[in-house]
Image (tube, rainbow, N blue to C red):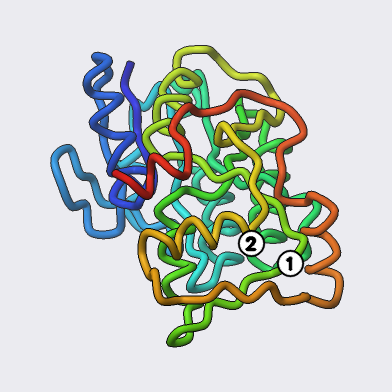
Amino acid sequence: MDVVVTGGTGRLGRVLVPHLGEEGHRVRQMSRRGAGPGGVRGDLATGRDLRPALAGAEVVVHAASDPRGDPWEVDVAGTRRLVEAVDRSRLTHLVHVSIVGVDRVPLGYYRAKYAAEQVLLASGLPVTLVRITQFHGFVDELLGTARRGRLLPVPVGWRVRPVDVADAAGHLAGRVTAGPTGGVVEFSGPEELSVVDLARSWAAVRAPAARVVPTPVPGRLGAALREGGALPRRGDHGRRTWAEHLRG
């Protein structure tokens, strides 16, 4: 099929695009600069070049996001622009990449992701919303950033189910051909871990001199994650574990 991947040069897109190509799809990776093989220009923040970038697409995998900038402009307003720009006469499926917990965790970025989901559900398009847990590589980077010399403070009581990005890409590739569900599905890693245990295994490999310090996190955010807000309620699981990621 003719597939366009928004955010094709991002952490997930870089793995997903070649995966789809290996399965025989004709893939265009859309980004602001149109970089890489099969790259096309399309800017969700402004709407520039969206229509030509999406022209003729039978499937769109919407993986673009802006967690460090203005997600309300890119994720929410940008998703509205995407809905207006797709070729409805050709589109058979729009697969949207979201995050497990966007409906339960009180973070501004998560609220924007949830709002983008609502835009798609109200669009009348054939959609599947795929909520995925945190990627191993992202968690790895986050722990490296959190370390303060020999100390690694991490939230106590939080539980997560991180996932390998290649496992997530494989799941999404399957969703492309499976057809729209019209609702939400979830995908996560193979094991549930406390953030404290996850950090200790990380420190043993990445920073043996560091000491993990379990730290209470007050407020609504802390409560939501202690109550399992970042854990999937259902859905399929990947195969690669956190320990395998650290060894790999």
Is the C-beta separation of discs 2 and 1 under 8 Å?
A: yes
**Residue 90: x, y in percent?**
43, 20
Front residue of this view, candidates 226 and 85: 226
Q: Quadrant of the C terminus?
A: top left
Task: Tally the marks.
Answer: 2
Tell me the amino acid under the disc marked 1: Val
112 vs 38: above or below: below
**Residue 203: x, y in percent?**
45, 65
Q: Is residue 97 left or right of residue 145?
A: right
Residue lying at the far left in this picture: please name it: 37
26 vs 205: above or below: above
Please give the name of the residue rendered at 28% of the width and 50% of the height, measured from the top-left corner. 9
206 vs 97: above or below: below
Tell me the amino acid under the disc marked 2: Val
Q: Which mark is residue 175?
A: none
- Mark 1 crowd level (few <14, some 14–19, many ≥20, 10 Å Cα): some
Q: Which mark is residue 196?
A: 2
Please give the name of the residue rendered at 72% of the width and 44% of the height, measured from the top-left corner. 231
Instruction: Give the labeled residue for mark 1.
Output: 156
Q: Based on the displayed image, in which of its 4 quarters is residue 126 positioned?
A: top right
Among the two numbered marks 2 and 1 on one chain, the one whose residue lies closer to the N terminus: 1
193 vs 5: above or below: below
**Residue 86: x, y in percent?**
46, 36
- Mark 2 crowd level (few <14, some 14–19, many ≥20, 10 Å Cα): many
Q: Quadrant of the N terminus?
A: top left
Front residue of this view, candidates 107 and 227: 227
- CA distance separating discs 2 and 1: 6 Å
Q: Is residue 144 left or right of residue 227?
A: left
